[in-house]
Amino acid sequence: MPASAIATPPKNKQLTSLDAKAEAIADPEKQQIVNNILGVLKSSNADASALLSFGLQNGKIAGRYRAGTQVYDYEMSPDSIDDVPVPEGRGDSYLRGYYSGFEPAIATQSKYYFKGWLSRFDAKSSKSGTGFGKKPKCTEGKSRLCGGTCIPLLKENGEPRRCRSDPSPKDKQTILDTIRSLEKRQGERSPAAPVTTTPEPEKPKAEEPPPEKKPESTPQPKKPAHQGFIETGDRLISDEARQKLDALTAPSGERLKLAQDLNKIKAGLKSDKIQGEKRKKLQEIGRATLAKYKELEKSENEAAAAAMKDIRDRMLRESAKQYRQKATDFAKGINIDDKATGENQSGALSGPVAGSGKAPMRKSAAELRKDAFEYYLLTKGKGADSIQNFTYERDRASANPEQKKVDIGKSPTKQIMFHEMAHHMEYNNPAIAAAAVSWIQSRATGGVQKLKDITGNQRYRDTEVAYTDKFLSPYVGKIYPYKGTDGKTRLRPATEAISMGVERMATPEDMVNFYRQDPEHFKFILGVLAA
Amino acid sequence: MIRYKLTNDFGDEVEISLDTKDQNDFVPLVFAGDHLAVTDVQDWLFQQSGPYGHTIREVTSPADLAYALGTEEAIANYNPEILEGGKIVESFDPGISDDEMT
């Protein structure tokens, strides 16, 4: 929907005719809500014909809208709209359900709202007797329907592949603005079910006023490579998890009060004015407040970790349906150096193991393969092509995709294993590496600098450089430049953003901490894993 | 052995040590001090990363610990002082070649 369409006079005529349809609604509460919406639409000159339905679903603003000839289900996030085309085959039931509250005559006008869509449905449905067979079945997670064919979800550079019938960002923004304005005016009202406004048919072109300057002439800004991943990740966070995570990141109620009290006490103790017994007393109060705060934080952490576990388990279950055998073959096929396991010839661990509290953690070959199996399922095998050897050459773990190996180091925790295997992901998927660099650059608040300058830690080498931002660690912004044979500096397809992120997906508790530290980074990684 | 003393805002001290002489050697962290103060330090420390991006856990290296305790946040909240083994972490070297990633 072009932005210029928002204030065109015929829209108000449409709104006037909608009043009559609102009057026909039998349910008084529903009618009141529709009237409220219409009132807002009239006063804001919004494009009522585009917003088909509006309401609350599971605590989120959701409904349907039309852009051009396509109808979309939308769900509103704080800053954007996530939408999916109304699937083929649901059009008729949608119509029945949607128009059930209004006079039947309007059903005859429905073709205006499904122009293109309904005809496609009719033409392709073999049951209708007019069709040419079934629509193609796209591979979930890899492709989607676009017209009569399946297209890959992502381009080679990692950007989401657009279908010509997708709504433009401008369409989305206009709808978002309309819904926000509705939400604001609706105030405290919370309808239990989605509420519909009545759509109006498009007027014949002859009745339209002279078209305004086409906004299409303004080129749409190209979507950055990482954005699609962030949006995908955001969609994977359930309402329940979001609620619990929000409670953690923005404490309220008692925990907020305790945090404020702690800050006051700490500020008081930093002052030299409080000394002697008064100081001791304040320290005691501080300890007691800290203990209460920790207790509350712990229970909120546990609730958030349970929600994260649901997200993680769901991803693993979904992946296992398709990749279980491949994951098993991958894990079994890795060559594990004898030195890497700490096992003697009989298979027993030669040294102290995890949990002993006395010595570095070592793992058996079976435990290392278990980590590899889980990594494969979580990432859907990304990077697996070059993970063929686990070695133990140096104490600090490292990855060398060109030599197809992971040096697991002296302490191969699941987190470290995931971290090193994830370096292979970028090596095998240039699109992911490009998205990682794009994300780092999008967050950068300055140019590339030496890590020793960014951190103030002079122990880094001069060659270690990174983009600066408030990442969860300055090392997230690290890039790997190299000089080509032509003398020009290029970037290796490697960052730390992916590996440090995937490491933090190793357990639900890690995921909670990750989200707390950098929600956008978390969503980006979640999207990468799901892609 | 590398050993640090941390002091929180309420004057409680926590000692952290790693029994090794190699900056990239991974050994278990040993904490000593008041329970609440130790828990508070652990909750914070186990979310920090070392100089090469590895998260600090129950098992870590002197380089990772030195890096985490050298940040502005650590200094502001815990005022870390090195008690022993400072020479181990005078410089950082992951000990890997340039074509590998940590």
Image (tube, rainbow, N blue to C red):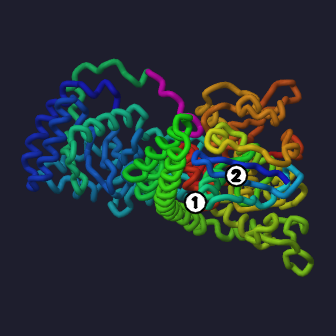
Residue A509 shows which numbered tag?
A: 1
Does A283 sit above or below residue A379?
above
Nearest the viewer among A131 and A408 is A408
Q: On the picture, is A529 further left or further right than A63? A: right
Residue appearing at x 68%, y 61% in the figure: A375
Task: Give the vertical position of A185 relative to A339 (above or below).
Answer: above
Amino acid beneath label 2: Thr
| Whether marks 2 and 1 lie on the same chain | no
Q: Is residue A230 visible to the viewer in this orientation of the structure?
A: no
State whether the magenta stretch is mostly helix, strand or loop.
loop
Which residue appears farthest toward the front when viewing the image? A276
To which quarter of the image does residue A18 belong? Answer: top left
- What residue is drawn where x is 71% and y is 27%? A448
Report whether residue A101 is seen.
Answer: yes
Circle 2 crowding by C-alpha within 10 Å: few under 14, some 14–19, many from 20: many
Q: Residue at x 73, y 64 (%)?
A: A372
